Amino acid sequence: MRKDVRILLVGEPKVGKTSLIMSLVSEEFPDEVPLRAEEITIPADVTPERVPTHIVDYSEAEQSEEQLYQEISKANVICIVYSVNNKKSIEKVTSHWIPLINDRTDKDSRVPLILVGNKSDLVEHSSMETILPIMNQYQDIETCVECSAKNLKNISELFYYAQKAVLHPTGPLYCPEEKELKPSCIKALTRIFKVSDLDNDGILNDNELNFFQRTCFNTPLAPQALEDVKNVVRRNMADGVKDNGLTLKGFLFLHTLFIQRGRHETTWTVLRRFGYDDDLELTQEYLFPLIKIPPDCTTELNHNAYLFLQSIFDKHDKDRDCALSPEELKDLFKVFPYMPWGPDVKNTVCTNDQGWITYQGYLSQWTLTTYLDVQRSLEYLGYLGYSIIYEHESQAAAITVTRNKRIDLQKKQTQRSVFRCNVLGAQGSGKSGFLQAFLGKNLQRQQRIREDHKSLYAINTTYVYGQEKYLLLHEVMPDFDFLSEADLACDVVCLVYDVNDPRSFEYCAKTYKQYFMDSKIPCVVIAAKSDLHEVRQHYSLPPLEFCRKHKLHPPQPFTCNTSDPLGKELYTRLTTMAMYPGECTRLLSLCSHVRRRCLCGCNRCTYCLCQNLLRLELLRSIKAQLRRVVFNRHMAQADLKNSTFWLRASLGATVCAVLGFAMYRALLKQR
């Protein structure tokens, strides 16, 4: 709704424009009337709509045509005043004033007009018979009011109608010639109906009608009032009520009735509650509420948002197969002005054997959108009516902004649920196959993907120590010299090379040394297409030696050319490394202090520890024991004269030996 209303009064000299304004302000007819009244501002608290109102007078004797044009351009509504006892002033309405106003305003944004017949106290007849043909001829005319400045007749009503014409205009809603709602109004009300239809059965039952009433008007309908509304619809429409609930046709009929009876403020209240502006477009404030995202923080959906999205999925999954068919997906997005998901979404998230988006894939796509483009996610939630259904101030309440990543590293724990893995590699190294395998698609299924339906993203869930997390894979285009900050900003990196291509690993090695060797981002080398013959790489170091030199995991073999179900172990490992980025390097260094070989004997201590939380905790315990041994040794050197020194040293060595043997047995049993 507008923050204020500006009313301009125009008309021929001596028709009573100034008298009308002065009678409104002083509530009595003035003895002396000036040529022009000064601009009057009526405070918001004394107007019916609680909006400040500015009333502007025009005087031909005191103002130039240029000043008149300026006032017309600033006005929100224009009252054309005529004298009911002066036919010439009535003729001037159509011959002069309406054409002049139309020439000075844009065709698409013309201000509403109100015809004001003043001096009704001087005649016994009404001028409405003369005015009605004019109203029918010009659609910009909202209404006509006959009044008397002398008798104070309809003065308050005049300015109320003028204010109402601005705040609740009829033009965008209703076509008087056709006597029906305009298409844009039908479209907006249809979306409102679908959002309010919580079970998606095409009917607003009593509970849904009461929720709608409370949402829009802050008060529920009494049972009898509810029945009265449905009875009005029944009497006028055969299919307006079904199963004792209101259908879409009945809902639209009710609003048509409101407008025809002059109660279009009721329809506007509903429209504005659901985010619409005067042009029946969803406002920017509604679709894009302000949300602050500090640097190095990410955005995720919170628990309430997932519950809401789950309810949206459930009400559109008609056949209860935990997947959305093309028809069900189209029905879900009917409240959108466009289809938000393209064909590439089916290669971004999990689908069933028919290629339909599953429940998990549906939530994954929402998670991806929120992580990559939170403004787009807010817009989508706005179309679905999140803030209205959950009665929040805005859909920004659905978003969690995670804390700075540096704090997670310091505390060695994270509350985040979404982790990003950038996948880099030379052209043809197998990056796309690695992404699609995360969605459960083997090479045979991948070969059926159309080129224009491919996606650079893949997102799915993994479980780390019993917690469900989202891993987002992003395939980075292999342009070594032009890797942007976005290409490098992630939680973990995959460097993919083709074991069958001798030139493939060189890209990985150079990328690692150029961009990631000195960073704290964990890196994993993927030996893709491991089902093929492995050839010698044309690089100074073989991949295994390169990884050992830079304290990386050994290259991880990977292939999607299999008929067996594709596992998630490698992706779980990536998620774990993303969650605990500082642990891998620290533990590798620590392990070299404890023993040259890991306790499990695999020579790959970080690989083992990232798979098993218990081993991580055991290694921490060993480090604590070593610290105590070193501390005791220093104490012993400072106290060599103490007669119990050798007894304490022997006892400490025994305890360490027993603990070390017990841990060794525990790890062997786990393996």
Image (cartoon, rainbow, N blue to C red):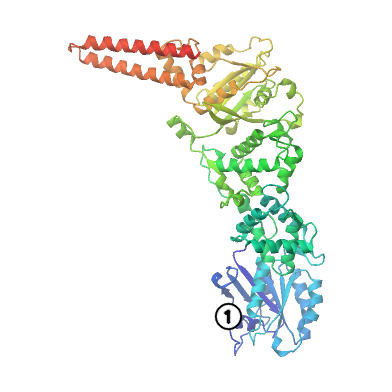
Residue sitting at x 58%, y 80%: 25
Please, is residue 321 above or below residue 614 in the view? below
Q: Amino acid at mark 1?
A: Val
Q: Is residue 117 above or below residue 249?
A: below
Residue 291 x/y as whole percent: 55, 47
Q: Secondary structure at mark 1?
A: helix
Quadrant into which the N terminus falls: bottom right
Q: Quadrant of residue 300?
A: top right
Residue 362 percent location from the top left of the image:
66, 36
Q: Position of residue 154 (x, y in %)?
A: 66, 80
Q: Residues within 10 Å of mark 1 (few under 14, many from 20)?
A: some
Q: Which is nearer the eye, 380 or 510?
A: 380
Q: Is residue 173 visible?
A: no
State the residue position of label 1. 25
Residue 535 to residue 292: above or below: above
Expressed as whole percent of the image width and height from the top left, the position of residue 614 reads: 46, 20
* Vertical order, 77 against 658 (above or below): below
The residue located at (61%, 85%) in the rendering is 34
The front one of 66 and 406 is 406
